[in-house]
Amino acid sequence: MENGRKWKFQGNEGLTTASSISIRGVLNMLMDNLNQDDPRVVIPLGHGDPSAFPSFRTPSVAEDGVVRALRSGQFNCYSSTVGILPARRAVAEYLSRDLPYKLSPDDIFMTTGCTQAIEVVLTVLAQPGANILLPRPGYPFYDARASHSGLEVRYFDLLPEKGWEVDLKAVEDIADENTVAMVIINPGNPCGNVFSYSHLKQVAETARKVGIMVIADEVYGHQVFGSTPFTPMGLFGSIVPVLTVGSISKRWIVPGWRLGWLVTNDPEGIFKETGIVESIKGYLNISSDPPTFIQAGVPHILSRTDDEFFSRIICVLREAADICDAKLKEIPCINCRNKPEGSMFVMAKLDLSLLDGIKNDIDFCLRLAKEESVIVLPGVAVGLKDWLRITFAVEPTSLEDGLSRVKAFCKRHAKH
Ligand SMILES: *Cc1c(COP(=O)(O)O)cnc(C)c1O
């Protein structure tokens, strides 16, 4: 230490460990393991941001909404802490299209992406001693954020043999008098599953029975391309109060715009009664808001984007899911029984007994990065050891190339 001086500050160790289990943390580790001498382009099948690929460019009408708002000079101001009224009204209208009741702008809180909506919810729920039920596999931001807020985490399984449905019996078993909420992600990240109407109704009834709210992560809402239609959890808001989180990041493929929302789907007014609404407002008072001009673009973005754009993206995703399914079937050590029906991910199980000297999923992904310049997320990062999470939302030609490299890798390392 310089001149023997003793500084009184130190990095918060809790944050170092929290980020080591994050998807970004693991992907950074894989990127560091790439072979710089490999002349081939790196194929990123690890993260969920296809915005760089030409097939996934957001429609110009969405860009126009933001540009017009910016150019008007009227939105250089601070936003109100809950978000500006035109944006909240537009989101209320957009989400009410799929509901049997009408959301009011007062049910909507604008957030900096779905990420901040999750942060708000978990902070609001973090009373001393409280616990929350999370899906496994899941989205690790919930785990990291809950632990950081001092909220105890308990897991229920998503069942691969039942198309990744929630193990509802487990929910009842692990909930106790300190359980406050359960989280569902639909359409699913990381599994690419879509919950049916009847399963969601059972989720609502189970949550009601144990007296907890449902947090519904619908950031992939409407991004479905299989046989199960998308059902918003808010449909069951009179059975159980639902906090819905979402954003324009995935459906409009603009994660960098950082525009999301937190919604109270609560026709019975339970969130008001229990102080949840006041608590959300209280937290937003000591937090930051999405940029005002982006918010001001929201009415235009939500009302003017034509269906042609959405159906084109759905077609691209369906084609990509098909390629993924077909290619994985050619690889003996990777098993994928559930073809994805939504979002942009699929979970596939590694059969390490067919491979020579590969210890686990992390080892597999590290070597794959080094030898084939392909990035795939090890399942352990989303709570399932010795599985892989594969993103198929990339340009179809890159996807084929990437999966062919995975196949070559597996062949090279196969046990003889
Ligand atoms: C991408 C993602 C988010 C974060 O969304 P942003 O709007 O980019 O903050 C939240 N939940 C899930 C399940 C996601 O995949």
Image: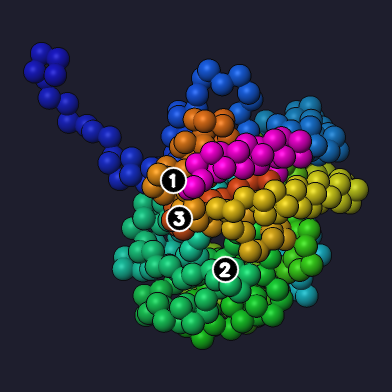
In the displayed image of the protein, which residue is found farthest to the bottom?
Answer: 209
Cα gap from disc 1 to disc 2, whole angstroms = 26 Å
- Is residue 214 a member of the stretch shown in magenta? no
Which residue type does callout 1 highlight? Asp
Labelled pair 3, 1 in contact (Cβ < 8 Å): no
Count of number-bearing discs: 3
Task: Read off the magenta span.
Answer: 393-416
Provide the secondary structure element on which disc 3 rests. helix
Instruction: Give the answer, above or below, for where 207 lies relative to 373.
Output: below
* Label 1: few (<14), some (14–19) or many (≥20) C-alpha neighbours in 10 Å: few
- Is residue 404 a member of the stretch shown in magenta? yes
Which residue type does callout 2 highlight? Pro
* Label 2: few (<14), some (14–19) or many (≥20) C-alpha neighbours in 10 Å: some
Q: Which residue is mark 2?
A: 160
Cα gap from disc 3 to disc 2, whole angstroms = 20 Å
Badge number at residue 353: 3
Image location (x, y in percent) of residue 288: 52, 42
Image location (x, y in percent) of residue 123: 43, 57
Provide the secondary structure element on which disc 1 rests. loop
Residue 183 can be seen in this image: yes
Badge number at residue 228: none
Badge number at residue 356: 1
Q: Is residue 223 left or right of residue 150?
A: right
Overall secondary structure of the magenta stretch? helix
Provide the secondary structure element on which disc 2 rests. helix
Q: Quadrant of residue 188?
A: bottom right
Image location (x, y in percent) of residue 298: 76, 45
Earlier in the chain: of badge 3 and badge 2, it is: 2
Which residue type does callout 3 highlight? Ser
Q: Nearer the viewer, residue 68 or 353?
A: 353
Looking at the figure, which quarter contains the N terminus?
A: top left
